Amino acid sequence: MALAASVAVAFLGLLHLYILALEMFLWETPRARKAFGTTADFARASKVLAANQGLYNGFLAAGLFWSLLLDAPLAKPVALFFLGCIVVAGLYGAATASRRILFVQALPAALAGLFVWLGW
């Protein structure tokens, strides 16, 4: 179970790095506009706001990767904190922006949290 927890945490870290890239650097591209369901005009107008969101996703990724580098007594609470932040953000995003966020972010983070809770 420890391996599953580490893999799940690493996957979520990589996912949030990908979201960082979409929001900070690729926001106006067709790929990002399709992923977030935005128009070219909206993407142009909201570029700075999206970059700010991307930065927050980078902090979440950094925290998850940090938890993978920590020793046993600290790794679990650090990972659970950052996974919990993702679950809360995912629930809020699903309620306010798109239900898809529930399945892309919140559910995977909750499952990873379960793996961490049981395996570390």
Image (tube, rainbow, N blue to C red):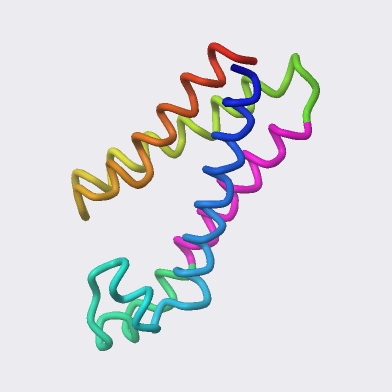
Magenta part mainly helix, strand or loop? helix
Figure check: 115 above or below 101: above
Q: Nearer the viewer, residue 6 or 59?
A: 6
Q: Is residue 39 magenta?
A: no
Farthest residue, direction top: 118
Q: Quadrant of residue 109?
A: top left
Figure check: 109 above or below 71: below
Identify the residue at horizontal 45%, vertical 69% (top origin).
23
Left or right of 113 in this view: 69: right
Left or right of 32 in this view: 92: left
The C terminus lies in which quarter of the figure? top right
Q: Count the numbered circles shown.
A: 0
Identify the residue at horizontal 28%, vertical 48% (top origin).
93
Identify the residue at horizontal 52%, vertical 61% (top origin).
18
Question: Which percent across, then down, holds residue 38?
Answer: 24, 75
The N terminus lies in which quarter of the figure? top right
Figure check: 73 above or below 56: above
